[in-house]
Image (spheres, rainbow, N blue to C red):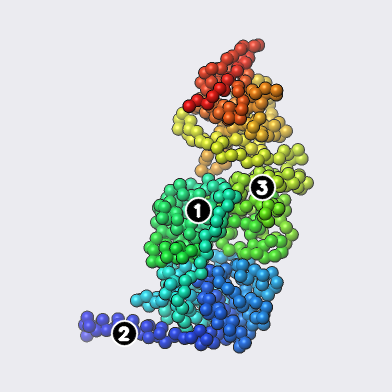
Amino acid sequence: MDATPETCCTKRTMTTRDWKTRFESKQLTPDRAVSRIPRGKYIFIGSGATEPVSLVAELCAHANRLADNTIMHLLTLGPAPYVEPQYASVFRHNAFFIGPNVREAVADGRADYTPVFLSQIPALMRSRRFPIDVALVQVSPPDEFGYVNLGVSVDVVLAAVETARLVIAEINPRMPVVHGDGFIPADRIDAWIEVDRPLLAVPREPLDDVVLEIGKNVASLVEDGATLQVGIGQIPDAVLRALSEKRDLGVWSEMISDGVMDLVRNGNVTGRYKTTDVRRVSSSFCFGTQELYDFVNHNPGFVFRPSDQINDPVRVSRQHRMVAINSALSIDLTGQVCADSIGTRFYSGIGGQVDFIRGASMCPGGKPIIALRSTAKDGTISRIADALEPGSGVVTSRGDVRFVVTEHGVADLLGKSVRERAMALIAIAHRDFRGELLSAAKQRRYVFPDQIPPRSILPGRHDTRITTKDGVKLRVRPIVVTDEPKLRDLFYNLSEDSVYKRWMSVLKRMPHHQLQQYVDVDYQSTMALIAETSPPNSEPEIVAVARYANIPATDHAEVAFVVRDDWQGRGIGTALMRLLSDLARDTGFTALEADVLAGNGAMMHVFHKTAPQLTSTLESGVYKLLIPLGNKPV
């Protein structure tokens, strides 16, 4: 017989009542809930802001009847009383990521640390290589369909809940309900207690000048439409602030903070070009201010997925122009990154760094970035070291590293030799340590014995863009010591005629010692500007150089320039000379002088175009030019 509408309605009501009845029957006092935990079992505690603080406190209150229990979790924001010495025979903590609340215990040997990629933890739980007997979590109240929500920490919590033999939950009405994979049937909860308190929050930190500069340097690598992975802390916050002019960014990140919320509100993050979760922010957990928790609550623009999805390097590689931004404690001159220890002392963890660095490396147009302050301990220690401190662990290998960023600039290590890497990293180290780093590099035979040190990084106003007559955009910036290989390539790509017109002699080679003279400028009495290409997925090439050097005992400077043959006639020389003249005038020079072969009509045309007031004298087939700088044109 067909069911009547009344019968169907009754069945649905009964089903709803069934789960509600079952769920309500599982409410216990904290004491009764925790009393269900046996001795000698593996206990998982929920992550980050969702740490079930009341259950943790009750767990320690039951210490007199428990023994040999292992407590496992990622970083948690609340207290960790179970690592106190008085509980040593009762609880042993195993940290997948070492937070401040357990760091001392790990260092003292009262707790363990398991180095592990975040992407692998859920599978390790399911295989019981990381056995979970009890999961203590915090969730939202069940919805009308009988589902609770893991809120702002799906990460590895979902796998723990799915595999645990006993799930005890705090039901908190203040837990945000976040779209994605964090919904679990209320029937999965074996026992629960009721709490009503704000989530653990992380206030915004003030940003100093150093991290703001790091943020600007990282932002210079991020293109419109890129997909971002960021963390939490001063450097990620500075990066996110520096992205306020970028457009159509996407987010695929293991965690998000208040800075992502700011970019979403500002319209910078649209997710328009994402390949997964288009037009939505994808993450696995977040922590920050209450404002952030309120913002993600029931917000369809956010989806939280477990760590084996978000951190999967293959999935990361499929995102559009993936930019992975991670930090480090130190890095050596070959590019080895230490991120989880200070010498033999474990400090944090591997987390998702390698997952995202490798994923971004595999992504077409992707950019893996390590960003760090150049110094530690109030400037007394260089984070860029000639060698890692003994006992330091390598989290990201030298083969995985590409961009390294400090407040002093960007080092691109992709495809670079140890010599090139060492020089690039010394160039972005703090100026107080560059000399000793170069000396150490020479002792280790990393660099040339006569290698000159890099100069201080220049003000950003010298870095600009020009457009050639045929519409090609080139970057113009001051030359640096690490440009030596590219300057050599420029020379050997010049025709004999161009070489002769520039140097007025037949040069067959440009050896290292001579190239060093051209890259060694002090940006005051000597200056050199280069024009280089900006290809999206390959190494920039220098296509032109213009330089001046002061003439002793005068306020004049000698000037010269050269443009690669296949780029000549496109207005590059004229643009460089105008920029160089402005810099010379700003520095205090009153005139430029140049020697030009009588047959070099193209160079004479450039000088006449950029300096109509010049005077010239012909001597033995060479024009002697005097170019008054005067006042800068309005």
**Residue at which label 2 appears:** 14
Callout 1 touching callout 2 (CB < 8 Å) = no
In the image, what residue type sits under mark 3? Answer: Ala
Callout 3 touching callout 1 (CB < 8 Å) = no
What residue is rendered at 70% in x and 65% in y?
345
Query: Disc 3 and disc 2: Cα gap in Å?
Result: 69 Å
Relative to 173, residue 609 above or below: above
Q: Is residue 371 left or right of residue 257?
A: right
Of circles 1 and 2, which is in front? 1
Q: Residue 548: image x %, image y %?
A: 63, 27
**Residue at which label 3 appears:** 429
SS at circle 3: loop
**Residue at which label 1 appears:** 240
Which numbered disc flags the more N-terminal residue, 3 or 2? 2
Relative to 390, residue 512 above or below: above
Q: Residue 558: image x %, image y %?
A: 64, 23
Name the residue furthest right.
443
Q: How crowded is mark 3: few (under 14 residues within 10 Å), some or many (20 or more)?
A: many
In the image, what residue type sits under mark 1? Answer: Leu
Q: In this view, does 422 lie to the left or right of 529?
A: right
Which numbered disc flags the more N-terminal residue, 3 or 1? 1
SS at circle 2: helix
In the image, what residue type sits under mark 2? Answer: Met
